[in-house]
Image (cartoon, rainbow, N blue to C red):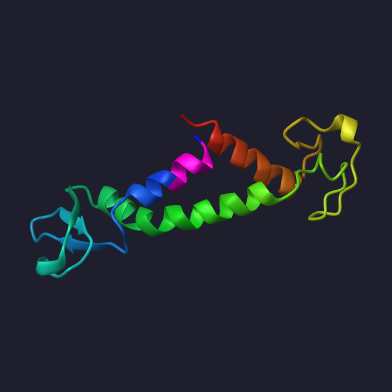
Amino acid sequence: MSLRTIKERVEAATPGPWAIARYQHGGGRVATSFDPADRELVADLYHEGDREFLYAARTDVPALLRVAEAVAMMPTPVELNGCCTFCDAVMDVDQMTDDGHWPHEVDCPLGMAHRSLADLEALP
């Protein structure tokens, strides 16, 4: 899944912020507003965890997308010729994998960020 796909999904979703209306008997709705005259139903969910997750996703996903886009703009440790500006590590580039993984226990934060982005983009 590319960052572009995620961004397209965010842009295609019902605009936020969203609100939660809880039912007395359990369950509830995720909607665009508490005002019935101005409300657009987003989801009707019984399980509280699902409801809370969906409610938060409308703001969480765009925020996480911005972080992922920022990581994508950062150079990889390979592009820095093995000198990580975050952990000040200087490693032998020949020992580094293509995804920026260092062969030591304390991983390079920059390499970890790029690997996490690669894992995200590998999702279906």
Q: Position of residue 64 (x, y in %)?
A: 50, 53
Q: Position of residue 98 (x, y in %)?
A: 76, 30
Q: Position of residue 26 (x, y in %)?
A: 13, 54
Residue reaching furthest to the bottom: 35
Q: For this rendering, which residue is in front, 57 or 105?
A: 57
* Magenta-tinted stretch: 2-7
Tell me what residue is drawn at x 8 percent, y 56 percent: 25
Res 21 quadrant in image: bottom left
Tell me what residue is drawn at x 50 percent, y 42 percent: 4
Q: Position of residue 43 (x, y in %)?
A: 20, 49
Side of 61 relative to 75 (left or right):
left
Side of 99 relative to 45 (left or right):
right
* Image: 36 above or below 95: below
The reply to whether the magenta stretch includes residue 59 is no
Side of 52 relative to 107 (left or right):
left
Q: How many marks?
A: 0
Main SS category, magenta section: helix
Res 103 quadrant in image: top right
Q: For this rendering, which residue is in front, 7 or 95?
A: 7
Side of 83 relative to 122 (left or right):
right
Tell me what residue is drawn at x 45 percent, y 55 percent: 62
Res 32 quadrant in image: bottom left
* Image: 23 above or below 97: below
Tell me what residue is drawn at x 43 percent, y 52 percent: 61
* Image: 28 above or below 99: below
